[in-house]
Amino acid sequence: MAGSADQVEPWEAGRFARIAQWWSRALGSDGYERHTVLLIGKSTLAATLAWVISANLLNAQSPAFAPFSAVLITQVTVYQSLVQSLRYVGAVVAGVAVQVALGFMVGPEVVTFALVALVALVIGRWPALGAQGSQVATAAFFAFSTYASATGYPEKITELGQIVLLVLIGSVVALVVNLSLFPPMRFRSAEYSVRTLAHALCDLLGDIHPVLSAGELEEESTQQWRTRAAQTGELISQARAGMRTAQESLYYNPRRLFRRHRGHTGFENYGAVLDALERALYQVASLTRSLHQWRDTETSYNYRAFVERYGTFLASIADNAHLLSALDEDHLADQAGELCRLAERAQGYRRQVTEQAERDGLPLADPARPYGVLVVEAIRLMEEFQHTSDVLRRYADK
């Protein structure tokens, strides 16, 4: 068909649209996409500067050590760059030192290489080196190759020393670039961590409360809720990692001195909210286990009204979680006020749950039935969200 060659396939148009959206987010907001672009740009600049210094200024025999080190040390935060540079330099120095000690005693023999590998791998297990422990063996192997190819002892010493020098150059260049060129301030990472857990909790409760409000309880549904609640552990770990990154972004960061960032001194309040949401997710997991273990042959008590009341209470908790899933520090005062109002409403529904259980004469003290556990979980859930609203209110009033 004429002109078909000029037409863009739908899958290609979709790919181009996604690429355009990615770059639009990178240019328009301080999020993951922009952080990725900045990290790649800073790594490229650091590697280039390290190469120019090592190859053009020093005329090093193996100039690639410097840019390799620069890329390895350019981390998301200044703090991580500093920590990893210290560990990396320590690992390289240890690896070269092992080669110097064994190489000059035994010589460039196969048995020497085996000893070097053995000692370097053992040292690499030292916890203080962290993720850079493997670099001990890498540096030792490169040092052995350099030692074996050099002709005289002065040249051997010079070449081995140059490896350490190049690693230091790459590390220092990476630190300077990361410190001076848009050092990241990850305040939004703390918000994102809270939003992630709140969104997961809101979604789970959003599936549970309509079923309970209708007075229905089927094994297939309760099994699905229990499985989903048990899978939130990975989300909690990711949220914790995001909070740590946000906290680390403050360490040794000169941007803290700027006026626009002086009001941010820490993440204790977001940390308290994250702790509360984590506990709430564990309590919902316990709640789903109790619902799943519900007796299908329960005929002694009329629990329909209790279940309906419980569904209404969980719906109110889901409203609290929904608000937290859109947490925004720029609008925190309004959100904190709304959260307090929602918490007060949920508190009323929580009291209705207890009153309904007592009115129907349900055996709250009987461990063989779930009524008591459900009431306790409702109280604990309410305590966490009341605590969350109080924390954010205090923070917003500062």
Image (spheres, rainbow, N blue to C red):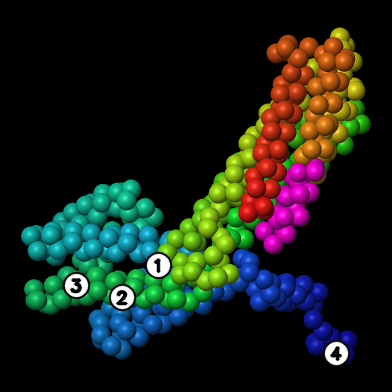
The amino acid type found where label 3 is placed reads Gly
Q: Position of residue 352 (x, y in %)?
A: 85, 26
Please state which of the two labelled residues, at mark 4 or mark 2, is closer to the viewer: 2
Res. 161 mark: 3
Crowding around mark 2 (Cα neighbors within 10 Å: few <14, some 14 to 19, many 20+) is: many
When asked about the image quadrant of residue 233, the answer is top right
In the rendered image, residue 269 lying in the magenta stretch gets the answer no
Look at the numbered disc 4 and give the secondary structure of its residue: loop
Instruction: Quadrant for residue 10, please give it.
Output: bottom right
**Image quarter (top left, top right, bottom left or bottom right) of the C terminus:** bottom right
Mark 3 and mark 4: Cα distance apart in space: 65 Å
Query: Which residue is the site of mark 2?
Result: 169
Location of mark 1 (residue): 73
State the residue position of label 4. 3
- Disc nearer the start of the sequence (3/2): 3
Q: Give the range drawn in magenta.
A: 320-342
The vertical placement of 320 against 247, above or below, is above
